[in-house]
Image (tube, grey):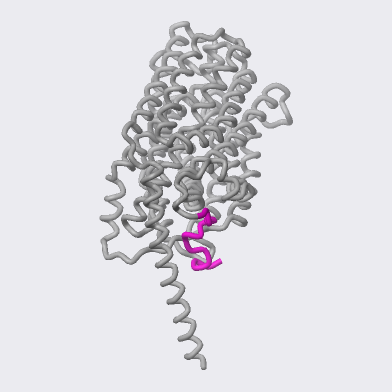
Amino acid sequence: MSDRAELAPASFAAEGSVSRVDAKPRRVLADWPLARMLNFGAATLPLSVLSLAMGIAVQPYIAQNLGVGLITISLAFTIVRMLDLGVDLGLAIVMDRTKTRLGRYRVWMVAGTPILMLGVYQLFMAHKGIGLVYLVIWLLVYALGSSIVGLSRSAWSATLVTRYHHRSVFYGVLTAIGVLGNLIVIVMAVLNGSFHVGSLNTVQLMGWTILVLLPLGLGLTAAFTPEPISVDAPVNRFPLRDYWEVMKKPEVLRLFISSFSLTLGPGWMSNLYLFFFIASRGFTEPQAYLLLGFYIMGGLVGAPLIGMVGARFSKHRTMIAATIGYSLGLCTIVITPKANVLAGIPVMLWCGFMGVGFDLMTSAMMADVGDQIRLEQGKERMALLFAVTGLAAKLAAAGALAISYPLLAAVGYIPTLAGHNTPAALDGLTAVFIIGPIFWVALGGLCFLGWKLDAAKHADIRMKLEARDAILAASSLTEEAQFMVAETEAAT
């Protein structure tokens, strides 16, 4: 397909008149077919499996089963994040400027898939004897592939649905698909931990599953999802000034800080989850994964509901409420009876329900900001904006390890001893597990006090954008017609 064949605002896109500011969430499925949502969501499934497996299973596996020290693991992830800091921003600038017959972001998703698969193989199939150098090399490959695929997918998603209310529900659907991917991780962990399916350990089983799902899911999305491409307005500004204006925009700064905080909090908890639930709370590994399954099921229900709440009551208010609810739920974990699965289920369902809204609302709000910036600058900056939140998430992921693992070592917790650590070390593990996530999640919620980009303001932005896009599209098609006439006359 050509660039001109899918010019905005026909962004799949024919979502109706901009005057429908009060469009209800229930209208989304009628206005934007569910089949197309699910097709784009095919890319979400393997990426969510990979994300949870990396956060929950791979790092403890490297520490406990492969014998790599906590400080070494923390150092490796920190080094990679420091080397990786500018990659997303550089990729984003190039992605936003890309125009091919296959689209702007589609080609990047396809190109990044084999790189990501190579990194996954080397990390999930690692054997004893690996050290810092091995981890740094293959974490860098993994990070590059993850950046290319994740950034192209995020930027592409923001161009597909353009209405304020619709975006909340759309990202709710995508998040629900991601939650299903998370459930795949839990099912594999519980079954392999309880019944030892085949000769593979749990992490290797997850790795092979991801290696099968990545080309299937990303391939379906790349092959069958249309990609609308906005027409750039003619401007005479120096590009670097535009990039600086994006970075210092108050809404972008808020979303950067909130994304950092709301990734670091749950990520901190994920990195310590198995240590805490097995060593401190007395659960077996299959039971810990089972409880995590309920956490994820809470997210499965919460994703579409929170999306609809965000569409009804505004995204920023919904985000604030979700951070408060998550923090309160996390506090109750330490007062439930130890090794009691039934007592832990309601707590995990509640935390999963609230926590699923963090990334959902952040993505929807960043897409709104992208429209505002395109109106101001006349250029597509979606990849750059999602690179900002991606950078925040990467810093947070590194920070979660760089802070939490050394803290565990400082309180005397030794992973290979599990529940046989001293009582003081187990108390330290509990404190580190609870206090860090609550602090960061609360900070993330505070970022949205006084948020101004609401439904009415966004509707005005879309009205002006679509009027300008219509003029630019007509002008572009006229230029193409004139070029074809000239070609014909020259040939004659």
| Magenta highlight: main SS | loop
Query: Could you tell me which residue is drawn at 55 percent across and 30 percent down?
Result: 302
Query: Could you tell me which residue is drawn at 36 percent across and 59 percent down?
Result: 379
Would residue 232 be seen by someone viewing this image from the given angle?
yes
Relative to 60, is 457 on the left or the right?
left
x then y, percent, for residue 406? 39, 22
Displayed quadrant of residue 424:
top left
Front position in the image: 352 or 397: 352
Residue span colored magenta: 1-16
Relative to 41, is 138 on the left or the right?
left
Front position in the image: 123 or 303: 303
Query: Could you tell me which residue is drawn at 51 percent across and 87 percent down?
Result: 488
x then y, percent, for residue 5? 53, 67
Q: Is residue 10 magenta?
A: yes
Displayed quadrant of residue 364:
top left
Front position in the image: 253 or 82: 253
Q: Is residue 249 magenta?
A: no
x then y, percent, for residue 305? 55, 32
- Work out whether 207 lies above or below 247: above
Relative to 231, is 115 on the left or the right?
right
x then y, percent, for residue 3? 49, 66
